[in-house]
Amino acid sequence: MDAVDHINVDVDDLEVCYPFYRDRLDLDLLRPPSEFQGEHAMFDVGGTVLTLAETGRADGWHGRIDHPLDKAHIAFETGRDDYEQFLKQLDGQFPKQGPYDWDEFEGFYFLDPDGNLLEVITYDPVPAGVSRTLLTHDDI
């Protein structure tokens, strides 16, 4: 294997999820829903295609999550400034959401409007003057 070519994410409501991925996560739009016969949208994320698909097969999972490792997820890499903004905007969704110290990078988990678990990570160091407690694998 050389790379991940694409990822399909089933969603219950494309009308709600599409603007979240486009505007909140600021993903590069490849094809909007208007270019598909079905309910789809395609984004480019660092050379990998991420497709949202309202197929009617989404699991409708909106249950309580206690720890991010309880559910599969997609992780997005970004720079420190954007990471800090996501952390401010999306904190408080569930316990042990993060941020986590994963040795090489820092990560923070959150839910999209359909309950899909996502993570945003950064390899950039914490800026001088910023202090916070990071969870570790031992906190699981």
Image (cartoon, helix red, strand yellow):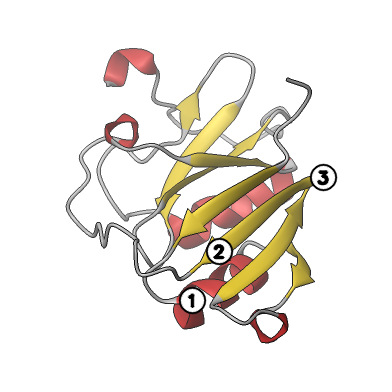
The three-letter amino acid code for the residue at tag 2 is: Leu
- The residue indicated by pointer 3 is 47
* Residue 65 location, quadrant: top left
- Give residue 32's position: percent from left, percent from top: 70, 78
**Residue 9 located left or right of residue 30:** left
Mark 3 vs 1: CB contact within 8 A: no
Q: Disc 2 marks which residue?
A: 52
| Image vertical order of residue 17 relative to residue 103, above or below | below
Residue 74 — which label? none
The amino acid type of the residue labelled 3 equals Gly
Dot 1 falls on a residue whose secondary structure is: helix
Which residue is nearer to you in this view: 73 or 128?
73
Q: Quick one: SS at disc 3?
A: loop
Residues at badges 2 and 1 in contact (C-beta under 8 Å)? yes
Residue at (54, 77) in percent of width and height: 39
Q: Which quarter of the image is occupied by the N terminus?
A: top right
Residue pointed to by mark 1? 14
The amino acid type, in three-letter code, at marker 1 is: Leu
Cα–Cα gap, marks 3 and 2: 16 Å
Callout 2: 10 Å neighbours few (<14), some, many (20+)? many
Which residue occupies 53% across, 34% down? 107
Q: Earlier in the sequence, mark 2 or mark 1?
A: 1
Which badge, 3 or 1, is on the more N-terminal residue?
A: 1
Marks 3 and 2 in Cβ contact (< 8 Å): no
Q: Label 3 neighbourhood size at 10 Å, few (<14), some (14-19), many (20+)? A: few
Q: Secondary structure at mark 2?
A: strand
Which is nearer the eye, 45 or 87? 45
